[in-house]
Amino acid sequence: MLDSVEQQIVTSMTTLLGRAGLEYRGRFVEVNDQRVHYLEYGDGPPVILLHGGGAGSAIWFRQIEMLAKSNRVIVPDHPLFGLSSQTAYEAPFLDSAKAYMIGFMDALGLTRADFVALSLGAQIALAMAMSESSRVGRLVVIGSSGLGKEFPLIYKLSNVPVLGRLIVRPNRWGQDNYFKTMEVVDSEFDDAGAYKQYAYDVTLTRGHARGMRSSISVLTDFGGQKSIFSDDQLRSIRQPVLAVWGEHDPVFPVRHGYRLARLVRNSSLHVIDNARHVPLLDNPDVVNELIAGFIGDE
C-alpha cells in the first residue's frame, strides 16, 4: 500500500513516462530485505537501465520507449531513490551496491544482461563487469563516477554539520539551479517541466534526506570521491564498452571518460557537444542513436 507521497511520485512518474507514450508499468521485488521498485517493458534480450544519484527509473523514459521495441527493458529505482526502500548505502560503497544489483538480478531470474547506466549507476555497472563478468554483456556508461577524484562541492558540503541537513532537504530552488548548471544545457526542453516535478517529488519520501546525507558520506569527503577504479581494475574489463560524455560535464569531467577509453581495451568514447552531465535529457535523439547502434551491434 503506497502512502500519499508515494502516490504523488507515481503520478509524476506516470506523467513523465507519458511524454514518451508509455504507460506506467511498475512492480516491486524484495532484494536483501529491501523493497525495490522497477519498471519493465518489452520482450527480447534483457537490458537493464541504471539511473544516477538522483530522481529514479523514469528519467530513462525516452530510452525505454526506443529499446522496448526489441528488448526486455528493466529499470530499477536504486535503494534510497524513487519508490524503493529509503536505505542508505554502507561502506565500502561498491560492495553495498553490487550486493543490491546481484540480488536484483537474482530476484528477476536474470543470469545475464546488457547495461545502460548513468553516473552512480554507471559505476555500479562497471563494478559488476569487473567482478561478475559472466552476468554483464554490452555496457553503455554515461558520465560515470569512480574514474577520478573530482566531485561537486555541493556534495562535499553535505558532510558539514547543520549545513549538510539544509543541502539535502527538499528544495525546489536548489534543485532547479543544479538542473540548469550541472545536468543539462537546454533547461527549457519540451519535457523539462515533467522531469523536474518527478525529480522533486522523489525527494519528499520519508527518510530520503537522512539516507542521502549518510550515503554521500560513504561516497565522498573533502578530498573527493572515495571509490575510484584503479588502472588494473579498468584493464580487467573484457566486455564491449561505449562511454558517452557531455563535453561540458561539470560533475565528472570528460577527462574521466578519456581515462576509461584508454584503459578498457574493448571500448570507445563518444563526447556529445553542447551537453552537461545528463545528455539523455536534452539530447535524447543523439543518446538513443548511440545506444541503439551499440546494443544492437552483434
Image (cartoon, rainbow, N blue to C red):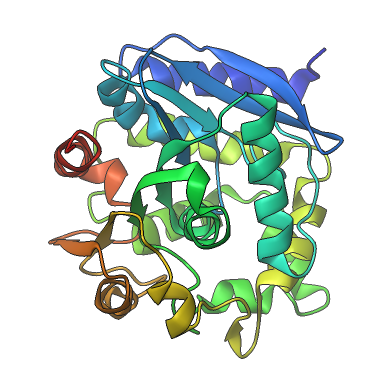
In the picture, the quarter occupied by the C terminus is top left
Give left or right: position of 246 versus 289: right
Question: What residue is shown at x 34% (from left), y 37% (from top)?
Answer: 192
Q: Give the farthest residue toward the front.
A: 134
Name the outermost residue toward the bottom.
Answer: 223
Residue under the point 24% across and 56% down: 185
Q: Is residue 22 above or below residue 238?
A: above
In front of the other: 125 or 149: 125
Please tell me in which quadrant of the rendered image residue 15 appears.
top left
- In the rendered image, residue 85, in percent from the top left (x then y), is placed at 78, 36
Tell me residue 83's x, y (percent): 68, 30
In the figure, residue 49 lies in which quadrant? top left
Quarter occupied by the N terminus: top right
Q: Residue 245: percent from the left, percent from the top?
A: 26, 62
Residue 164's image quarter? Answer: bottom right
Q: Residue furthest top?
A: 23
Horizontal and vertical percent position of residue 157: 66, 78
Give the side of residue 196 with respect to residue 280, left or right: right
Residue 150 seen:
no
Residue found 44% across the figure and 8% down from its top: 23
Is 107 located above or below residue 92 in the figure? above
Number of residue marks: 0
**In this rendering, would 286 be left or right of 217?**
left
Which residue lies at the image location 65% right of the left edge and 53% below the top edge? 98
Instruction: Answer whether residue 110 is visible to the viewer in this image.
Output: yes
